[in-house]
Amino acid sequence: MAEPFSLKDHLFNAETIGELAEEYAAGLPGFDAARFQQETLAGFPERGLMERLDWIADCLEPHLAPDFPTMAEQVEAMMPPPLDPTLRDDDFGRFIHAVPGILAVRHGLEDHRARALDLIHAATRRFSMEFYIRPFLNRWPEETLVRLAGWAGDDNYHVRRLVSEGTRPRLPWARAVTLTSDQTLPLLEKLHADQTRYVTRSVANHLNDIAKKEPDRVVSGLRDWARAAQQQPKELAWMTRHALRTLIKQGDEAALDLLGYRRDVPVTARLELEAGRVPIGGALSFSLQLEAPQDLPVMVDYRLRFVRPGGKEAEKVFKLKATQIDAGQKLTLRKSHKLKGDATTFTLHPGVHGIIVQVNGVDVAHTDFMLTSG
């Protein structure tokens, strides 16, 4: 049987640490690459993914100057070339290059914040510093926000993305920040017209975070951006859909209206399951027929209602299709949803489950099915 995939071993192993040691040796005279690699690898087995990053920093520190300004110069000298500035998306960088951010927080946060932010600015062109800017936002919010406002106009799109991604209210894996939308929305205002998808995706994700608490403010802001016409219409339309995805799943009327999905037009639906009993590990296959009295753009989602231990229930929303119903014509959609028994984020339990179809945020069909253990 093949060994299960290990992200931490994929990211941090003899090969990647060897490459990192060579980079350090090229920028730091007298650096003992072999010793560094040996010490670093020896500490990996008992450490998780993020702990390994901290451990790499632990192993590097004895080779660096004790005073932070000199340390920062050394770390910058050891950095690899910046990521390709001509690309427009999905060039996140390599986790092994997160170490400068760790050192900036450890040694620069309290007494050398300006120099530490310089280091983060340089480092984020090699690997996103979104985790490491956040301690500075919490400790020195005004000073850091001023710096970020300047970075919003930086020539490097990785730096511009950091302005949005680093200030997100709900950044995955990251510590919370104490910022309000009053503090972050002016940054997004500057960034929303960016011509790089890597940046605009972050802006949309940031808006989606804000929308979970302030939906009206996000919808209003997107309307203002549409009127300002500073972004290409196609790109702004994509950003708007992405920013409103949570509100759309919730059936938020204002969000649906902004996207042109009307709730006041009645939709007739017929939902049919291929089988009423589905084993865990199998697939729930269904067909859906929709009709409307007039041409109608539709956002079709479905929710699965799961039974939980103790009689509790939980629901998850899934996208089906954004399309259009033509007046007097039946629109037929089909889906086969895999009910994985080995999912790491959600455990399935046998029992009566349900599927609910919603069109433009309105529930239009529902049926139950039996999920079995085999």
Image (cartoon, rainbow, N blue to C red):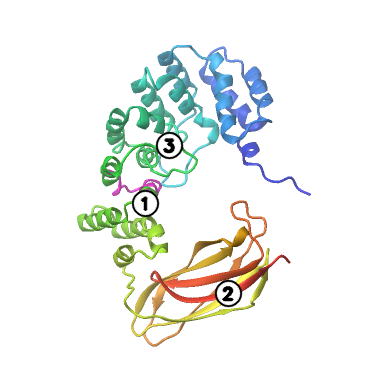
Residue position marked by numbered label 3 in the rendering: 130
Q: Is residue 305 magenta?
A: no
Give, as a single range, the part of the protein colored magenta.
190-203
In the displayed structure, does residue 10 sit left or right of residue 249?
right
Q: Quadrant of residue 354?
A: bottom right
What separation in Å lies between label 2 and label 3 (alpha carbons)?
43 Å
* Viewer-side residue, 223 vs 135: 135
Read off the residue under disc 1.
204
The type of residue carrying mark 2 is Asp
The answer to whether residue 133 of the structure is visible from this angle is no
Residue lying at 59% horizontally and 35% vertically, measured from the top left? 49
**SS for callout 3:** loop
Q: Residue furthest right?
A: 1
Q: Left of 73 or right of it: where is 353?
A: right
Q: Nearer the viewer, residue 203 or 23?
A: 203
Judged by its main secondary structure, the magenta piece is: helix
Q: Secondary structure at mark 2?
A: strand
Residue at 36% of width from left, 85% of height from top? 327
Residue 246: image x %, image y %? 41, 58
Classify mark 1: helix, strand or loop.
helix
Tally of marks: 3
